[in-house]
Image (cartoon, rainbow, N blue to C red):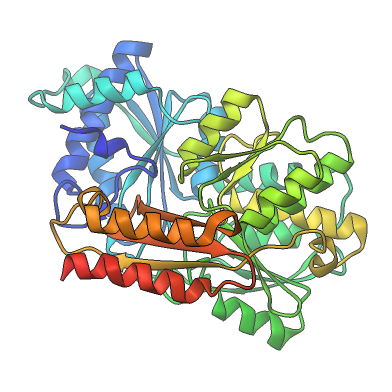
Amino acid sequence: MTRRYFGTDGIRGTVGQAPITADFMLKLGWATGRVLNRERGRARVLIGKDTRISGYMFESALEAGLSAAGVDVSLLGPMPTPGIAYLTRTFRADAGIVISASHNPFADNGIKFFSSEGTKLADGIEEQIEAELEKPLTTVAASQLGKVARIDDAAGRYIEFCKSTLADRLSLHGLKIVLDCAHGATYHIAPNVFRELGADVSVIGASPDGLNINHEVGTTHPAALRAAVIQQGAQLGIAFDGDGDRVLLVDAEGREIDGDDILYLIATDRHAQGNLNGGVVGTLMSNFGLAMAMEQLDIPFERAKVGDRYVVERMAANGWYLGGESSGHIVCGHVQSTGDGIVSALQVVAIMMREGKPLSKLLAGLEKVPQVLVNVRLPTGTHAKTVMASEPLQQAVIALETELGEQGRVLLRASGTEPLIRVMVEGRAHLDVEALAQTLARKVQALLD
């Protein structure tokens, strides 16, 4: 067994293809329960999921495996990933399990673990679980089987937590917002949060049927939100992904506000108030303009590898409280232990209300450089690392980096959730980064043909 089961974004795979099967989930629940009981005595685990149809099957399989190992289980039902992290801490559970494939199509599903503190499991625990998976499954005595119960007020508890992250008495009265819930886990949470805070809210992408999660809505398809914001004359649009840990915004003119913009807004506001408490962690994909803006304000800025796990690791190592990715996964460490789309959006909305300014004016100090990302899909069985390590491709990258000099950047990386190689080129406005990225992507494709 390899560590791929505990990757940057948790298990990812397609239903019916190894290793993501009900049998595997049953065994994984059992192995996890065995380790937790050994570490903590009789353990308790929370399970939550997004809205994709396979979540019912995987939830039942995990529940059965945990019970067979003698672990008590509390079911949360559909719940955003950050909500599960929060409730794991709140209920003092020994672990939280999320069944979700985030922004992926409905046919994909996966799993992510949280520790009792709402952070990733320790490497030692993961390694022990991997070892247990190699052993034959045995069931504890009937009298020691784990019990299963449902937490009926889970949604209400998380809604109140989200509201509590704003300053006392801050009202969103007079703010017209369109929410896009991606037919995902925020569908019954986000509208209540913003309405209870006083906003005038309309909603799209809030009718999950198990098959439509992320389909032409959410952070990966912002066109639907842009159209709704403009049509309704809203001041702001907020899009979440399928499990609610990512967020993207749309301003009143329909311009997309990505994770780099959101990091800039939160960082500059907290810096001005004297409570940033350190610097900001971005990733290798963060726009060059964000790094320059932080430098001009004397705010330390560091790039981590792509993935929320690496962002959080660098935040912890530096003792910083703010980090995130251009994809919209923002970690506001002063209020939440993991990326939280609703909480991050509220941080921005609070700045808008307090300053009385639209997003366009609040972002005036950030000058981003053109950045183009091209995805090259890999054939089944092809390993991204092998392709990226090929001599012709390495020579092409070196040649392009030489051409760009100090005016831009090149990045090739494997997707952590899909069979893709991501080709990124960014540079100053006078450079044709679109053409440069497409040329490099064609060289990647040529290696696959």
Residue 240 in view (yes/no): no
The residue nearer to you, when weighing 389 against 104, is: 389
Q: Does the rendering let one see residue 303?
A: yes
Residue 291 vs 70, above or below: the answer is below
* Closer-to-camera residue (367/87): 367
Tell me where residue 233 appears, x and y as whole percent.
Answer: 77, 83
Q: Residue at x 89, y 65 (%)?
A: 357
Q: Between 159 and 238, which is closer to the camera in this rendering?
A: 238
Q: Percent position (x, y) of residue 291?
A: 67, 48
Residue that lies at the very extreme toward the bottom in this rendered image? 231
Residue at 39%, 54% in the rendered image = 398
Q: Nearer the viewer, residue 321 or 305?
A: 305
Left or right: where 79 falls relative to 158: left
Where 206 falls versus 301 (above or below)?
Answer: below
- Residue at image position (60%, 68%) is 370
Q: Quadrant of the C terminus?
A: bottom left
Image quarter of the N terminus: top left
Residue 353, given in percent of the width and then of the height, sits at 87, 59
Residue, x 80% and y 69% (percent of image)?
360
